[in-house]
Image: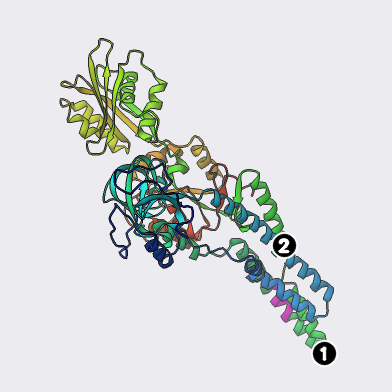
Amino acid sequence: MCSIGWKPRRNCSPNATSPVFMGFTTGRNTNVKDFPVSTGLTSDEARRRLEKFGPNAVPDTALHPLRRALTKFWAPVPWMLEAAIVLEIALGKYVEAAIIAVLLAFNAALGFFQEGRAQATLAALKSRLALNAAVCRDNVWATVPAAGLVPGDVVKLSVGAVVAADVRLTEGEILLDQSMLTGESIPIEAGPGLQTHAGALVRRGEAVAEITATGARTKFGRTAELVRTAHVESSQEKAVLRMVRNLAMFNGVIIVMLVGYSCALKLSLGEIIPLVLTAVLASIPVALPATFTLAAALGARALAHLGILPTRLSAVDEAASIEVLCVDKTGTLTRNELKVTAAHPMPGFDESHLLGMAALASSDGGQDPVDAAIRSAANQAVASDLPKLSKFVPFDSATKMSEATAVGLDGATIRVVKGAFAAVISLTPPSPSASTTADQLEAQGFRVLAVAVGPPEAMKVAGIIALSDPPRTDSAALVAELHTLGVRTVMVTGDAPATAEIVARAVGLDGAVCPPGPIPEGVRSGDFSVFAGVLPEGKYDLVKAFQKSGHIVACAATAPTTRQRCARRRWESRCQPRPMWPSQRPASC
């Protein structure tokens, strides 16, 4: 199974090259032995490990169609209709029993086919997103499906690669975008020894890594398992049962009165029993479940035209009933792309020259989000007298800088350095104003870069550039609309509190920020508007706490780890072609 689709490349020496692949990430498995990077695993060993650990995929928990169909008849509401059928038959009313049976079958069939279509669409999307990996087997690089990876495999991570398993880097340096895992929009520099998880994206560089966990043993796999095992009773089902309970209580009184009056009239037992059964039937709203299902199917059809795919019919009703919406920050309230928020030139420079010089020391093209943001900002305010680039040195994680050599209009050689403030300022004379500006921007949660310019032997600080992940243009309007609809929006993110607070204020979340640390005992939805620095387990606990206080909770997120937080949510959507808000149109639902 491991060897299917293999395309041998070059040997697995550290200097061997291979094409760009879609790849993986890290997690530690103590059962994995260390193997030399030069050889990786043998095909036989990989096959044995695949049999032992299973494929690198989350176990498919989808029910067989027949079993899924049977579940439509095995729930409190179907039980209620089935009891009505039995009572009608007991009364000899076979036509009425047949009508109720038709309603029961219609209710089950409509839900089965609607959800089946949604699941088929999801399966098609998953097949299109299948990953391949560059793996070293038998001392040669080969391209294999990511599902065939095993712990101990040596893989290559290249620009654009998606980390498909938990890995530990062994060689090379890369820029990792972990926003889909942690909620932090700023990429991190990763080198040998760093562990990362499936779902990270390689933005720059190339590295070799050893897989430490696959499939359900990865962090993402454990999250998926939590989602699978979590269960919450449908609010629609609770509403129907509540109605039946109230009718039963009222009819119970009527039945007692009927029995008492029948006894006073000295009716026979054969005459009293049909009266009692008829009164019991009156407690069962036989047409209500079918009405709910039909309304939900029509709502799902309308949502499909808006690009929203409910995976369960009950999701439509749940979306209209939510009271608290937990939203992720990165990629949900924000664009998940870095932008230059502010440029602070030092004396002797203006903003256009500062950005232009920084652009000279930025890579042209590629997937480095920092360089892309600076070049985009520089293109909006072009300086006409910039020096001509003659040499570019990419970012080096050891020096935390990138640099360029340029030739000025007078022919003089100019060195331009861009990078971390502490690294750049060490190359120039002290600048109190630059230090103060950098400290203020960092305190506000921005990523701060410094730019130094000048002759190689006499450089000076040209200015400070602040970057951030800006809010989406529609976020503030949506938060305000949700508020008018009675839905409280709460931001829950793994990002730093300072950064989260800036975004929250920008989109209209003006409540308090929860202090970093464990979720407070007995926390309620109105206590805080922002929960920052929250681990996945904490997000899960937060939703449980909100639900314990009686709220119907929904989640909107793009990050896989947020599915762990939303494991107990009652509504879930799959959206094409872009993420949409789960409750953007609750009134129409």
Q: Which mark is residue 290?
A: 2
Q: Residue at x 34, y 48 (%)?
A: 11
Q: Secondary structure at mark 1?
A: loop
In this view of the protein, which residue sits in the foreground, 349 or 142? 142
Lateral position of residue 483 relative to residue 110, left or right: left
Q: Amino acid at mark 2?
A: Ala
Q: How many marks?
A: 2
Q: Residue at x 67, y 47 (%)?
A: 302
The stretch drawn in magenta includes residue 254 = yes
Judge the density around disc 2: few (<14), some (14-19), many (≥20) Cα neighbours within 10 Å. many
Q: How is the image coloured?
A: rainbow
Q: Which residues are magenta?
A: 249-256
- Residue 229: horizontal and vertical position, in percent? 49, 66
Cβ atoms under marks 1 and 2 closer than 8 Å: no
Q: Amino acid at mark 1?
A: Ser
State which tag comes first along the sequence, 1 or 2.
1
Taken as a whole, is the magenta stretch helix, strand or loop?
A: helix
- Residue 485: horizontal and vertical position, in percent? 57, 46
Residue that numbered label 1 is attached to: 268
Judge the density around disc 1: few (<14), some (14-19), many (≥20) Cα neighbours within 10 Å. few
Q: Nearer the viewer, mark 1 or mark 2?
A: 2
Determine the image quadrant of residue 376: top left
* For residue 185, above or below residue 244: above
- Residue 133: horizontal and vertical position, in percent? 42, 50
Q: Which mark is residue 64?
A: none
Res. 523 in view: no
Q: Using the numbered discs, state the Cα–Cα distance from disc 1 to disc 2 in whole angstroms.
A: 37 Å
